[in-house]
């Protein structure tokens, strides 16, 4: 059966009537059009505008920067597609393929949108392969040809790891492009372009987080994936033992925050808004633990709230002796004899140690500077001096002068704002050209008479950053980045930390934008010997010499200590240590060291305070990394530092970042003491391993200083004991420098020397053995030669005791 469509003609009369009806309707519509209103600014009247005015977007124009952004983002996206195309034949991971598919779908669609946007505006559409042209100026984050070659050559897990690292870098580059665009005046006014930049920020930030988590999963380090918790976090430990933990004492934590934390633990389904508030309060530093100092069997734990003293005669059972409440932050402490010195920087600090703070902008009650306490009665310390300074004291360093035993000197490092000249005469934050007496670009030198500490005072404020040729006070790094792909580094107008080595007349300063080496043979008038910059450093934070001051480790506190800066995707030379050799008074770069285990977005982590582990013949450091835990590493070969032990806990909070982790970790008399910002005090010890022998650890434990302040280093002289000689023997065994017969012979002599007070015959044998060891030092490596000579010297020292 055939079906036919039948078309009936529309009646003419009806058609005419319809036209008339439409005309009348349009006229009526125009007559009844409601007003179009454009409101004014708050408080100003609204006005009526025409339909033409309402639809006129002529005032909303795109800028040249908008065009350049779109033109540059096209090849940027195209390179991402070139990278994802490599996955098909180089990965076996379904998760990697799914991620690549997400990237391809979004980037292909956005390339088409950008091309169309440029065409509609009559602008040149960049070719998708423009980045292969020899004269192409690469956009932020784009891979170099060498990096693409490396990616193409990789396979399997190695490919996955490199792909994630490079794609994260690529995505961050896109975020930088958006940030740079929005920083320019009059950009992204176009609605479509603004929506695109918002999408890039949201999508690529989310993708970075996913890739960072995937990258962390590629490591087998036990520190990855530890369970979160305040009191019950997961732990990972290697070549160490945790021997004691002490929570913060009463009066040194926020009870309201603790109560909220306990309630939060019980009510895991609390509303998100309530969850958002609690950890921020708990993470505040008002009660945060800070630095450590040691004297005899006492450990002094600094705090933003004051300090606590523990007796550690038995390190496995620290006993609280006294708690001193004296707020002001950050509360770093040093101890010399019966004096305890404390740094105070915050504007809430009071001369009388009061808890109420200081409300007035200018007040005689405010204290910022160096406090001095008499601790001769450990249970009732007395404040005997309070030296006011213009920027307060973020940290400080004790300096002793062998030619001036009646005085202590303290280098005060203020990193905060300069207080008003109304509050403290002579204070100014003007530039040196405007005011030669400015408080910027200086350190404070404070003299404390040991017999009359109440007379402590500032005796000099040297310009340690002065340019020796021009005389300009602001003579070092002026702030900013070092070129594409580098850090933005703080201006060098203060030092964060200075570490002194008084007996050698040297100091190393970590000074915001530079690392510096100082001659402090005259402590009151330090002179800069050298200075260095690092394009990966954001903020030069602290410094540590090795035992003979032939090396310096500088740390970078990227993110200020409160941000997650040890993620799998973070650059290995950002937020890390930089290791330098000291050669003829100059600093020569050798390597970087960063915590090897990736941390999460919920863990603040960056290089922080540490000290030497005094193993003879080696350079070993223990260091705090906030919520990255404690890392022990060997930098004897300064170009190749190696981790040899660690301890770590999971994040404080499972949902978000809460401030915590280790502020400081120092070796003292055979143990490692760590101040946990939020939790309390930990005591750990190293245990024998493939990296440290029992003899090496015993030799380190034989070093028992009367006092220890990490920022004041003293040369370590190991007493000539058999255990020290055995430590050298173990090291020579590790490098196979001595024959087995020679090692056995020397071990036998040392066994006989143990417990013997006098034996002239044995002494003669030890001297003969020492001479033979000296003779074997020819033709071996420099490091083995040093150990052989140290062994020979130790053998002679033992012989002297036996005569």
Image (tube, rainbow, N blue to C red):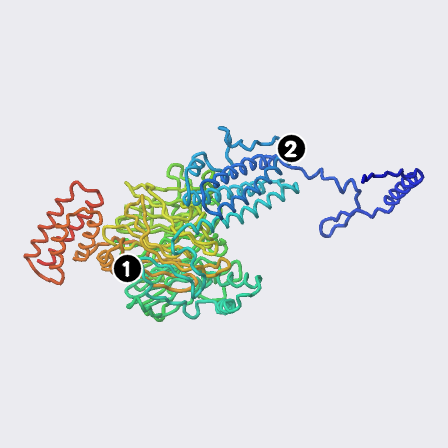
Lower position in the chain sequence, tag 1 or tag 2? 2
177 displayed left or right of 477:
right
Along the line of sight, which residue is nearer the eye, 388 or 50? 50
Question: Would you call the spot at circle 1 few (<14 residues within 10 Å), some (14-19), or many (20 or more)?
Answer: some
Residue, disc 2: 119
Q: How many numbered tags mark residues here?
A: 2
Tag shown at residue 769: none
Evaluate whether residue 610 shows in this view: no
In the figure, 80 relative to 692: above or below? above
User: Where is residue 60 drawn, in percent x and y?
Assistant: 68, 39
In the foreground, 754 or 601:
601
Residue 193 in view? yes
Point out residue 425 in the picture as x, y percentages from the top left corner: 46, 54
The answer to which of 126 and 38 lies nearer the viewer is 126
- Are dots 1 and 2 in contact, CB under 8 Å? no
User: Which residue is identified by label 1?
Assistant: 687
């Amino acid at each position: 059966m055939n079906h036919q469509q039948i078309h009936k003609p529309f009646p003419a009369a009806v058609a005419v009537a319809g036209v008339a009806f439409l005309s009348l309707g349009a006229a009526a519509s125009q007559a009844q059009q409601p007003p179009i209103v454009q409101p004014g600014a708050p408080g100003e009247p609204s006005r009526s505008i025409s339909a033409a005015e309402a639809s006129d977007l002529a005032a909303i124009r795109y800028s040249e920067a908008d065009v350049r952004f779109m033109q540059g983002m096209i090849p940027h996206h195209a390179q991402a597609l070139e990278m994802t195309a490599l996955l098909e034949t180089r990965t076996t991971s379904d998760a990697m393929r799914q991620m690549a598919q997400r990237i391809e779908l979004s980037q292909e669609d956005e390339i088409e949108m950008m091309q169309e946007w440029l065409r509609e505006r009559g602008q040149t559409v960049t070719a998708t392969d423009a980045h292969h042209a020899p004269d192409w100026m690469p956009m932020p984050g784009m891979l170099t040809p060498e990096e693409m070659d490396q990616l193409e050559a990789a396979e399997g897990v190695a490919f996955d790891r490199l792909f994630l690292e490079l794609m994260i870098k690529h995505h961050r580059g896109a975020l930088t492009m958006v940030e740079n665009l929005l920083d320019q005046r009059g950009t992204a006014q176009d609605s479509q372009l603004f929506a695109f930049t918002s999408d890039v920020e949201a999508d690529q930030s989310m993708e970075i987080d996913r890739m960072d988590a995937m990258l962390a999963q590629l490591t087998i380090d036990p520190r990855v994936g530890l369970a979160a918790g305040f009191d019950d976090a997961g732990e990972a430990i290697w070549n160490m033992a945790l021997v004691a933990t002490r929570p913060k004492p009463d009066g040194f934590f926020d009870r309201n925050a603790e109560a909220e934390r306990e309630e939060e633990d019980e009510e895991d389904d609390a509303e998100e808004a309530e969850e958002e508030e609690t950890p921020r309060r708990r993470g505040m530093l008002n009660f945060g633990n800070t630095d450590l100092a040691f004297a005899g069997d006492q450990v002094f734990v600094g705090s933003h709230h004051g300090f606590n003293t523990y007796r550690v005669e038995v390190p496995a059972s620290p006993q609280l002796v006294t708690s001193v409440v004296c707020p002001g932050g950050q509360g770093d402490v040093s101890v010399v004899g019966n004096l305890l010195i404390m740094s105070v920087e915050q504007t809430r600090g009071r001369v009388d140690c009061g808890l109420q703070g200081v409300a007035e902008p200018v007040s005689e009650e405010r204290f910022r500077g160096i406090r001095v306490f008499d601790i001769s009665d450990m249970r009732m310390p007395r404040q005997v001096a309070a030296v006011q300074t213009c920027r307060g004291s973020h940290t400080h360093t004790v300096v002793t002068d062998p030619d001036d035993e009646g005085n202590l000197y303290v280098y005060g490092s203020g990193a905060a704002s300069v207080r008003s000249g109304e509050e403290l005469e002579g204070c100014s934050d003007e530039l040196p050209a405007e005011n030669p007496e400015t408080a910027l670009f200086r350190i404070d030198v404070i003299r404390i008479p040991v017999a009359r500490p109440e007379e402590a005072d500032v005796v000099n404020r040297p310009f340690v950053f002065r340019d020796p040729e021009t005389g300009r006070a602001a003579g070092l790094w002026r702030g900013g980045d070092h070129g594409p792909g580098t850090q933005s580094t703080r201006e060098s107008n203060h030092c964060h930390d200075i570490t002194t080595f008084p007996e050698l007349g040297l100091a190393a300063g970590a000074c915001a934008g530079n690392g510096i080496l100082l001659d402090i043979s005259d402590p009151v008038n330090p002179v800069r010997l050298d200075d260095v910059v690092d394009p990966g450093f954001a903020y030069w934070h602290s410094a540590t010499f090795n035992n003979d001051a032939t090396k310096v480790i500088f740390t970078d506190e990227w993110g200020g200590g409160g941000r997650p800066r040890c993620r799998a995707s973070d650059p290995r030379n950002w937020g890390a240590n930089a290791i330098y050799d000291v050669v003829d008074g100059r600093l020569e770069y050798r390597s970087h060291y960063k915590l090897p285990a990736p941390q999460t977005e919920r863990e603040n982590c960056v290089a922080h305070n540490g000290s030497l582990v005094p193993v003879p013949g080696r350079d070993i450091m223990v260091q705090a990394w906030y919520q990255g835990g404690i890392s022990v590493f060997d930098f004897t070969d300064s170009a190749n530092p190696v981790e040899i032990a660690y301890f770590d806990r999971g994040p404080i909070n499972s949902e978000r970042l809460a401030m915590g982790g280790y502020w400081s970790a120092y070796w003292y008399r055979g143990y490692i003491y760590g101040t946990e910002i939020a939790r309390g005090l930990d005591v750990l010890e190293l245990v024998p391993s493939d990296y440290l022998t029992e003899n090496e650890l015993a030799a380190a434990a034989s070093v028992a200083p009367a006092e220890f302040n990490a920022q004041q280093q003293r040369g370590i002289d190991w007493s000539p004991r058999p255990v020290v000689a055995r430590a050298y023997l173990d090291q020579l065994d590790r490098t196979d420098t001595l024959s087995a017969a020679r090692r056995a012979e020397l071990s036998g002599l040392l066994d006989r020397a143990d417990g013997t007070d006098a034996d002239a015959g044995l002494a003669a044998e030890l001297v003969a053995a020492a001479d033979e060891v000296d003779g074997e030092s020819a033709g071996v490596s420099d490091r083995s030669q040093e150990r052989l000579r140290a062994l020979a010297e130790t053998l002679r020292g033992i012989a002297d005791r036996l005569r």
